[in-house]
Amino acid sequence: MFRKSSLLLLIIALATPFLLAAAGDGAWITKVPGKNRQRQNPFDHQSNAIAAGGKLFRQNCASCHGDEGTGRDNHPNLHSDRIRNATPGELEWLLNNGSLKNGMPSWSRLPEQQRWQIVSFLKELAAGN
Ligand code: HEC
């Protein structure tokens, strides 16, 4: 007989991979739509944008990711291959949408221009410059 408890176990078994999607596993990248992925950063490698992005980072991001972006607790280190290899469009999408279930807020309240400045800064950071 199929008891209620076995149904519950089945549901738990099926849901486990989704529940296990954890902060810092990079699963957010798979959610970025193609058209966002391909967007170019209008401020790529521009030193004034990198400086402005660094200031925004210290104001908005350092509390979780650390002053140097090296991460702490379940807040990922941003000096990583994932950030180095991500397209600018992927990073801007993450900033705009966040990864709310895993604790990364959305930064859609910042003007788009500031999100691209932050992306310039992140790329510089991840490149180790
Ligand atoms: C409240 C804490 C918090 C704040 C503030 C925060 N983040 Fe995050 N951030 C997270 C968490 C948690 C993750 C992991 C999300 C995931 O893996 O789904 C994350 C993930 C990221 C990632 C992807 C890292 C990876 O390896 O996948 C980037 C890039 C990032 N944050 C940049 C920023 C920037 C830039 C800011 C400021 C504008 C910021 N974060 C502010 C908590 C935070």
Image (tube, grey):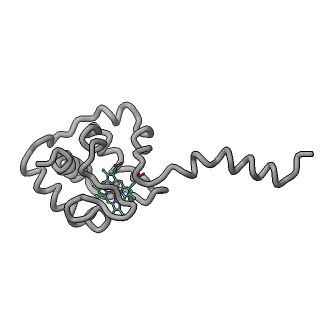
Rendered image quadrant of residue 108: bottom left
Instruction: Give coordinates of residue 83: x percent, y percent.
Output: 27, 44
Q: Decide which of 121, 81 is in the foreground and name it.
A: 81
Q: Residue at x 29, y 68 (%)?
A: 63
Residue 51 drawn at (x, y percent): 10, 55
| Left or right relative to 13: residue 66 | left
Q: Is residue 80 above or below residue 103?
A: above
User: Which quarter shows the N terminus?
Assistant: top right
Can residue 113 be seen here? no
Circle count: 0
| Residue depicted at 11% across the width and 42% down the height | 45
Q: Position of residue 35 (x, y in %)?
A: 36, 32
Which residue in the rendered view is the most extreme toward the left? 47
- Where on the image, by quarter, is ligand 1? bottom left
**63 lies above or below 29:** below
Give the residue drawn at x 72%, y 48%: 11
Relative to 67, 45 lies left or right: left
Q: Position of residue 79 (x, y in %)?
A: 24, 50
Give the quarter of the image for residue 87: top left
Pick the residue in front: 10 or 59. Answer: 10
The residue sitting at 43% across, 60% down in the picture is: 103
Work out whether residue 114 or residue 20 is closer to the camera in this orientation and state it. 20
Q: Nearer the viewer, residue 116 or 71?
A: 71
